[in-house]
């Protein structure tokens, strides 16, 4: 089996909501108006409310309160809107994954943290498409969820090597399936008809300098994923958080042309930002005393 075949197999099981599909199509059309987007967003009250919360959060730092969907879209931009809708939609789409493999709260902690770190590194690197790269960071491990849900028996074999770290898990994926989570995730993004640059970044995150067109973007996600892995792990009881030891490829870091001393600040800022963002797009259930 190829990653393309597995992605096609689960495409119906893990399909995006209609609102996400419609918005994705509209944003790609040059003649789309703000009102066109407003009409689609209004079809989903949850997404509309989340958009307003995000527009009024410190994530965007807008100077005045945003109280209409049209103003929110105008201020945060259409591509940021797509990222928001995709974020909330994907979290909803993958509910119900067995806790045997992953604590979904931890998984989204890791994913959102990676998205935030990716965005911050992209900004420091002088890149323009920071919102798109946030989405690449958010979705960098989406292939793992497909493995968990569609091939649980085989993935138990993979997790036998989980105590040996992430590299051992990736190697076990390739042994058991013939491909890894990054390649599978990229194929799912293709099946969802997301921008092609996005799936390339996800596919080459483990070997970023081999990416044909998006090597710097893939390098940013590669570094961000390593940082997020230590800040917010996604496989239960894998290890205890402690001192952070760099494990990303040095060549990937060098391609970003950043000083090493920015890492501490990036991690600190990202921790605060990811906590706030998680409470907006995936709020914790209230505790009943």
Image (cartoon, rainbow, N blue to C red):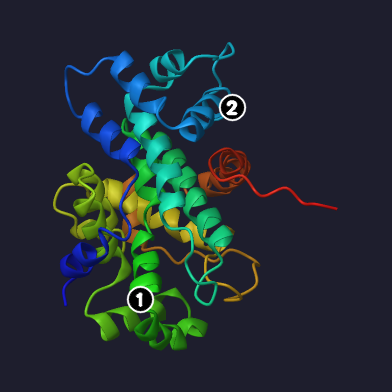
How far is mark 1 from mark 2, CA to CA?
36 Å
Q: Which residue was labeled with disc 2?
A: 57
User: Residue visible at 32% across and 47% down?
Assistant: 16
User: Residue visible at 50% across and 72% down?
Assistant: 98
Is residue 75 placed above or below 12 in the rendered structure?
above
Tally of marks: 2
Return the x and y of residue 143 as percentages of the image width and height: 33, 64
| Secondary element at image label 2 | loop
Return the x and y of residue 262 as percentages of the image width and height: 52, 44
Left or right: where 113 falls relative to 124: right
| Secondary element at image label 1 | helix
User: Residue visible at 32% across and 53% down?
Assistant: 219
Farthest residue, direction left: 212
Left or right: where 232 falls relative to 249: right
Q: Which residue was labeled with disc 1?
A: 170
Is residue 38 placed above or below 49 in the rendered structure?
above
Return the x and y of residue 190 as percentages of the image width and height: 19, 52
Q: Nearer the viewer, residue 281 or 168?
A: 281
The earlier-in-sequence mark between 1 and 2 is 2
């Amino acid at each position: 089996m190829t990653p393309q075949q597995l992605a096609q197999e689960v495409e119906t099981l893990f399909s995006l909501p209609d609102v996400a599909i419609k918005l994705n199509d509209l944003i790609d059309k040059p003649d789309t108006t703000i009102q066109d987007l407003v009409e689609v967003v209004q079809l989903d009250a949850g997404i509309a409310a989340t958009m307003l919360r995000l527009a009024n959060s410190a994530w965007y730092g807008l100077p005045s309160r945003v109280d209409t969907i049209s103003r929110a879209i105008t201020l945060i931009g259409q591509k940021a809107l797509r990222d928001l809708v995709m974020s909330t939609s994907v979290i909803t789409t993958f509910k119900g994954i067995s806790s045997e493999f992953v604590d979904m709260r931890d998984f989204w902690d890791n994913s959102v943290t990676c998205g935030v770190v990716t965005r911050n590194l992209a900004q420091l690197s002088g890149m323009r498409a920071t919102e798109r790269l946030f989405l690449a960071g958010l979705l960098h491990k989406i292939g793992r969820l497909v493995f968990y849900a569609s091939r649980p028996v085989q993935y138990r074999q993979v997790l036998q090597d989980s105590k040996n770290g992430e590299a051992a898990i990736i190697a076990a994926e390739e042994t058991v399936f013939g491909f890894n989570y990054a390649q599978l995730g990229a194929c799912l993004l293709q099946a969802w008809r997301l921008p092609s640059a996005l799936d390339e970044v996800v596919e080459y995150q483990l070997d970023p300098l081999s990416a044909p067109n998006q090597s710097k973007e893939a390098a940013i996600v590669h570094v961000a994923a390593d940082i997020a892995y230590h800040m917010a792990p996604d496989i239960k009881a894998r290890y205890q958080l402690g001192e952070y030891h760099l494990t990303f490829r040095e060549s990937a870091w060098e391609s970003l042309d950043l000083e090493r001393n920015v890492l501490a600040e990036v991690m600190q800022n990202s921790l605060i930002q990811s906590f706030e963002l998680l409470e907006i797009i995936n709020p914790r259930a209230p505790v009943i005393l």
